[in-house]
Amino acid sequence: MYIHLRDKYSGISSARVKETLDRSRRYQLHKASFCNKPAPKPIIAKAVQDRHQVDLVDMGEWRVKCALESKVIEDIKKALEKNDTDSAALITQKYLGDINNISLNIAVTGESGVGKSTFVNAFRGIDNRDEGAAPTGVVETTMKPEPYPHPRHPNVTLWDLPGVGTTKFPADQYLKYVEFEKFDFFIIVSADRLSENDAKLAQEIKKIGRKFYFVRSKIDNNLSDAKRSQREYDEEKTLQEIRENCIQGLEKQGVASPQVFLVSSFHLHLYDFPALQDTMERELPSHKRDFLILVLPNICKSTIYKKKEVFRSRIKYYAILSAFVAAVPIPGLSIAADSSIVAKVLQDYLNGLGLDEKSLEKVSNATKRSLSDVRAGMKCLCSGQNVTKEHVNSMLKHSVYPTVLVAAEEGSRMLPVLKIPIAALLSFTSIYRVLTSTLESLSVDAENVLMEALDIK
C-alpha cells in the first residue's frame, strides 16, 4: 500500500494533497475547514524537493519515536521475565515522567509595536488582561527577554523578546543578546510589511540551524481597512495579496522560500494560525511534537483530535502501572492506587481539552452564557469538575463493566496460585477501558464547547 501511494502521488505539492484531503468527508470530521484558505501555489521543483526532504525527516522522527516506545516495552518485558516487577514499574514511571516533563522554549520576536505580547498571550490561551499576561502597549514594553510559562504546562515557555532593530538591540548583535541557543524555534512577528531587520534576523537564525516562521499579525485590522476603502471587497483576494506581498518582499531581501502566516491574535481560529500549528508540529522533533500539541489552544476539531490521540497513546503505560500495583498481594492497595492514577490522568485530559473549570468560565464570558448553560450539553461526568479520588470512585460505580473488574480483581487475590497474574490482568483491563472511554467522551464534549465558543451551529 505504501509503495502504491508513494508511486501514485510522488512529486505532488502539499497544496494538492490538502485539496484532496479536504474532499474527504472522513477527514473533514476532524479537520475544520475555513473559507479563507490561501490559494494553492504552482508546483516548483525546488519546493517539491524541500517538501520531500521534510517528509523524509517526518518519517525519520516517526521511526525514532516508535523505536523509543519499543525499547521501553522491551525493557519492561525483560524485567517481567525475571519476575522483577519493581524494575518494570520504575521503567514505566520514568518513561511517563520523561514525556510529561519535556521542555519547550519558543521565541517570539520582531520590531517594536507589532503585537508580539498579544500573540504570546493568545498562544498560551489567556487574555491581555489576565493575571500573568505579557504586558502590551503602543510603545516597546519589552526591554529584555521575558519568559511566560504556559499556565498549565510550565515546562513550555514563550519568550517575549525585545524589538529587533532598535538602537539598543541592533540586528547583528540581537541573537547573542537573547541567548538564542536555548530556543527550539523562532516566530518573527510583523504588523506591516516584513522589514529588512526581519529578513536579516531570519538569515541569522537559519545560520544557527533553527526553524523560524513569519507571522503577519493584526490581519483583522488590515481586512477592516480594506473593507472600508475597496469598492468591491474580496476577503480571500485581499488575504492572498497581503501574503504574496510579504513573500516577495522577503525574497527580494534574500530569504529563500519564506513561510508567512497571516494571523489575528484575537481570532486564532481564522486565517493562517491553524496552518502555523500544523507546520510547527511537522518540523519539531517527535518527542517535542506531542508536547506542543497538548499546549496549543483549541481552535478547531483537528487540534482536539490530535490531543486525544496523544493522550490515547499513553493510556497503556498508566494501565501497566496499575497492573504492577495489583501484583502486590495487599487487599485494597490496587483500588487506592488506581483512583490516584485515574484522577491525575483525567485532570490532565480536562486541562488539555479545555474542559477544566477556568477554561469553561472563559467560554461562558465570551459567549455571554451562564456556566451552567455551557455545562448543560456535556455528557461526561467529570467535564468541568475538579477531579479527585472520590470523584473517580463515583465514576467507577457508574461504570458497570469496570466495577465488575474491580470486584473480580480483589476476589482473585484469594486464589492460592494464580491470584497475582489474574489481579494484574484485570487491573490493566479496568484502567485501560475507563481511561479510553472517558477520553472519548471528553473529546466529544470538547468539540461541542469549541463549536459554542466559535458560535458554529
Image (cartoon, grey):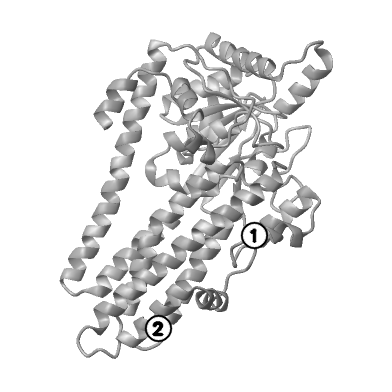
Camera sees residue 101: no
Residue drawn at x 44%, y 31% as measured from the top left: 210
**Looking at numbered disc 1 in the image, what kind of residue is underneath it?**
Met
Distance from the alpha carbon under mark 1 to that under mark 2: 29 Å
Residue 80 drawn at (x, y percent):
20, 70
Camera-side residue of 130 and 15:
15
Based on the displayed image, in which of its 4 quarters is residue 320 positioned? bottom left
Q: Secondary structure at mark 1?
A: loop
In the rendered image, the quadrant that contains the C terminus is top right
Q: Residues within 10 Å of mark 1 (few under 14, many from 20)?
A: some
Say above or below: 325 vs 453: below
Q: Where does label 2 land, which residue?
A: 407
Q: Secondary structure at mark 2?
A: helix
In the rendered image, the quadrant that contains the N terminus is top left
Camera-side residue of 182 and 85:
85
- Which residue is situated farthest in the top direction here? 252
**Looking at numbered disc 2 in the image, what kind of residue is underneath it?**
Ala
Based on the displayed image, in which of its 4 quarters is residue 268 positioned? top right
Say above or below: 326 vs 95: below
Residue 245 drawn at (x, y percent):
62, 12
Camera sees residue 363: yes
Q: Where does label 1 land, which residue?
A: 378
Mark toward the start of the polypeptide (1 vs 2): 1
Residue drawn at x 68%, y 38% as measured from the top left: 117
Q: Residues within 10 Å of mark 2 (few under 14, many from 20)?
A: few
Q: In the image, is 38 to the left or to the right of 310?
A: right
Residue 300 drawn at (x, y percent):
59, 41
